[in-house]
Image: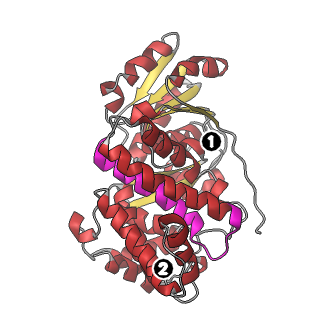
Amino acid sequence: MENFDLYLPTHIIFGKDRVEELPELTKSYGKKVLLTYGGGSIKRIGLYDKIKELFKDCQIFEVSGIEPNPRITSVRQGVEIAKREKIDFILAVGGGSVLDASKNMACGAFYDGDPWDLVLDPSKVGKSLPIFAVLTLSATGSEYDNSGVITNTDTHEKMPIFGNMWPVASVLDPTYTFSVPQNQTAAGAADIMSHTYESYLVRKGNTLTDGFCESMLRTVIESAPRALKDPNDYEARAALMMASSFGCCGLLNIGREPSPWVVHGLEHELSAFYDITHGVGLAILTPAWMEYSLNEETAPRLANYGINVFGLERSADVMGTARKAIELTAKFFKDIGLPAKLSEIGIDDKHFADMADHVLKIWFGDFSKALRPLGREDIINIYRACL
């Protein structure tokens, strides 16, 4: 059992109509609110008007149009407003991208330089504005963690930001996800599963958190097809939303060997160069990474994954069971409508070498400590296997 710290200060408020409780939760923080949101879905479902009514006694400033891979340009806009108007707290309404951008805005409000500096150097992250969230997409888990991911299109970089950026409270109402399109629902499911794989598929785990991870994966595998078949299936949407929150909060990591989060590192390079949907990139990369990591040493862990998640029978052919588990993983992503190859979304090998060099330079995880240790050529080979 590895040493661990676990700190989960966010108040999760789960269920129908719980957004009504936000004014009471925020009243002690002030009346100047920075409302952040994305492309307008919150207006289509009536949530924007609901928020405006709930906070009619507050002075509301807005940053809208936050991108799916949130850009530093949107963050800069929010930081400028926060400083100029002396904002009291941020209300982030949307998916993980809105939350990620809001976290960078929150700490940027107390930083004298460019908020991109805080992405490049987490040691510069200090005080942050309080953040409250209303989630509308089950995917990233940003509603229950202290990190985010920001894209700089000028430098082709998509990088994580870490710091004291836990939301004070996050409202999770599954009905707000009923209108999420099928492609986003599927990509979100892949994101939740990838967060779980990053914690689960390490060289040293433990019985308790292996079980947590396996339950998470079974939940998504059962619930995602149901949500795709019937977008208004409350129980399926609720299960995905709950799983989303626990994917990144640290609970799945306790007592385990630290994970370098290989697939996320590789996917961030894809998103930075090609601006693809994060979950799509993860779905393409994950089976290729599993296959590349498969050897005599790693086969038992991958075989147990197949047995405990997909219900494969335990047999003497450990390698065969492991391969079947990887095949079923790829099949699941395909069955929920996600592409299986980079070539399907117009990506070739032009930037693979640059991407490998960059991820090894900037990524927080040590790829030599992955399930199978990886170097530059290994990373390039995984990208190539995805073509």
What secondary structure is found at the residue carrying circle 2? helix
State the image coordinates of residue 147 (x, y, percent, origin top left): 57, 50
Q: Residue at x 48, y 80 (%)?
A: 321
Q: Residue furthest top?
A: 57
- Magenta part of the chain: 181-208
Please state which of residues 385 and 101 is positioned toward the viewer in this rendering. Answer: 385
Q: Splitting the image into 4 quarters, where does residue 121 fall? A: bottom right
Q: Residue at x 41, y 61 (%)?
A: 157
Please state which of residues 222 and 348 is positioned toward the viewer in this rendering. Answer: 222
Residue type beneath disc 1: Trp
State the image coordinates of residue 158 (x, y, percent, origin top left): 43, 58
Residue 166 numbered tag: 1
Residue type beneath disc 2: Ala
Image quadrant containing the N terminus: bottom right
Please state which of residues 292 and 261 is positioned toward the viewer in this rendering. Answer: 292
Chain-order first, disc 2 or disc 1 = 1
